[in-house]
Image: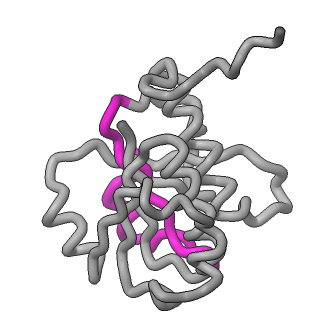
Amino acid sequence: MFHIVLVEPEIPQNTGNIARTCAATGAVLHLVGPLGFSLEDRYLKRAGLDYWHLVDVRYYSSYGEFKEKNRGVPLYFLTTKAEKCYTDVLYEPGSYLVFGKETAGLPLELLKANWERCVRIPMLEDARSLNLSNAVAVVLYEALRQNNFKGLKIKGPSRK
């Protein structure tokens, strides 16, 4: 239902955790290079545990390739620079949530070109940012909540 786009991720453990979140929610994971690690990295594999077979992962060598192969899709760019809160928009099914690399976020020129679709997660002024895997989970679950968690198991087994 939703797509997570990681532009130039640098930390394999974050990407592995995000892959696990995608596996649990049915979100497609798009990895846009250059990556800051090998796809064979043991930390990446360990963080994703045994969920990798449940994840639809798509790879791109650059943001240009990603953009060309995903034309006309609804994109939302997550950045600490945005004025709009992530809860102030309505995420339609099929939306792509775009996140930048851990040390620098998304390129400023990309944000400027898409300013009306940039959103942020509120936090204290002195905090730089959330951990990437936490930020992905926060925004993805808001998008899922807005769409009634369609396709997800909402209730656990009843107590007897």
Query: Is residue 51 shown left or right of residue 4?
Result: right
Question: The N terminus is located in which quarter?
Answer: top left
Q: Nearer the viewer, residue 142 or 87?
A: 142
Q: Is residue 104 visible?
A: no
**Nearer to me, 96 or 80:** 96
Residue 145 percent coordinates (x, y):
55, 25
Q: Position of residue 110 (x, y in %)?
A: 36, 66
Above or below, comparing residue 147 to residue 133 in the picture: above
Residue 159 belongs to the span the image colors magenta: no
Residue 132 lies in quadrant: bottom right
Residue sitting at x 85%, y 61%: 126
| 116 displayed left or right of 94 | right
Residue 141 can be seen in this image: yes
Above-or-below relation of 89 to 126: above
* Colour option used: one colour
Residue visible at 55% across and 88% down in the picture: 41
Counting from the top left corner in percent of width and height, residue 74 is at 28, 42
- The relative height of residue 147 versus residue 65 in the rendered view (above or below) is above
Residue 57 x/y as whole percent: 36, 64
Q: Which residues are magenta?
A: 92-117
Q: Residue furthest front?
A: 160
- Residue 59 lies left or right of residue 35; in this view the side is left
Q: Which residue lies at the image location 27% right of the left edge and 75% below the top edge?
A: 60
Total residue callouts: 0
Q: Residue at x 65, y 70 (%)?
A: 47
Q: Quadrant of the C terminus?
A: top right
Nearer to us in this view, 32 or 104: 32
